[in-house]
Amino acid sequence: MCNMVLTCVLFGLLVVCASGAPRSECNDSNCKLPDCHCFGTAVPGGLEPKDIPQLVMLTFDDAIDATNYDDFYSKAFVNRRNPNGCNVSASFFTTHDYSDYMRTYELYRMGHEISLHSITHRTGTDYWATASVEQLEKEFIGQEVMLNKFGLIPKEAMKGIRAPYLQNAGDNTFEMLAKNNLKWDCSWPTGQNEINQIPWPYTLDFKSPQDCPIPPCPQKTHPGVWVVPMVDWMDDDGVHCSMVDACTYITDEDKLVEFMKANFHRHYDGNRAPFPFFLHAAWFLAMPMRFDAYNKFLDYLETLKDVYVVTVSQALEWIQNPTPTSQMGDFWKCWEVPEDTCKPIECHLTREDVGEERYMEICSPCPATYPWIDNPAGSK
């Protein structure tokens, strides 16, 4: 029943009150893989946790530049393999200002996923919380244009977003995703992180029951659009954090590795929902031992023969087709490095709104003006 007396109408499988809020509950009969998946803690496909691979999602946010590429990104994943013999891979949520598009292209060629984090990463959460569908398109689809034009990233390879400051615009965000054939969002934190109570990624075919620590959250349905919950990490004092660099301040390398392992095992020893390891590379710069700890943790994962370090999109591929560890085989085919077609050019341009010079290393001829929102191609 509705919480208040409203006229309700039957619309397919959904009963919708006059307020527009869907009322029916998601279940296995009205929501079926691969296109629909209900919010919940059960392993997709009815499999047992002990029988499935543990998926690990490594992500980084913000501009890819010479420093974080040369010092961290180009080193962390070298010669690391998943149990199927393929290279491990990560997802990079990129912004435009100060981005090195040649190095972004190199990460793509290495098999990593390039995702969208907005053009401007504008300061102030109100801007993002109240953004219209059109404004979100300028930020995210405009960035898609930039990555394709200047970094040669195929449009079809860019499938998801993370909102700046993890500040979604509620239904407008998911309407923008659906309208532009983007598949998923990974911006929505959840404090539901107790062992065996961790939610799996799900679609918005039904109204989400996920907790909403950073409103607004969607109130409507957006069929086929996936939510990849940002499951909080937790320290010994019960303090939660969605991004690892916002977690408890640990200065001892071995203790930091144990902190990483403890959060990993909340997933691995429980329902094996994908384990999130979400960072900004600046965390490494502030304290070099953190990068050593990160690599030790990745070393540890390589000792576990049912753990796969994959991109966000690869994790969703598994959820859409749940497969036991014993049958993984070549579930994900090893990445074939594409031919290097980037001809790097360094461009010196002025960002007019702040009157500052910008250097862009790109894989195409220099644009006429500095690319920015409302002018992503730099053509005017």
Image (spheres, rainbow, N blue to C red):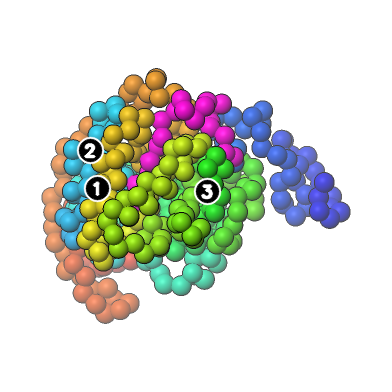
The question of residue 121 being in magenta is answered with: no
* Spatial CA span between label 2 and label 3: 28 Å
At x 43%, y 54%, the residue is 162
Region rendered in magenta: 40-63
* Residue 374 in view here: no
Looking at the rendered structure, which numbered label has been put on residue 295?
1
Disc 3 marks which amino acid?
Asn
The question of residue 52 being in magenta is answered with yes
Position above or below: 306 against 248: above
The residue indicated by pointer 2 is 80
Q: CA distance from mark 2 to mark 1?
A: 10 Å
Disc 2 marks which amino acid?
Arg
Q: Quadrant of the C terminus?
A: bottom left
Q: Which residue is mark 3?
A: 193
In the figure, 315 relative to 139: above or below?
A: above
Q: Of the residues shown, which amino acid type is indicated by label 1?
A: Asn
Report which quarter residue 247 is drawn in: bottom left
- Looking at the image, tell me whether mark 3 or mark 1 is earlier in sequence order: 3
Q: Nearer the viewer, residue 286 or 347?
A: 286
* Quadrant assignment, res 117: bottom left
Q: Secondary structure at mark 3?
A: loop
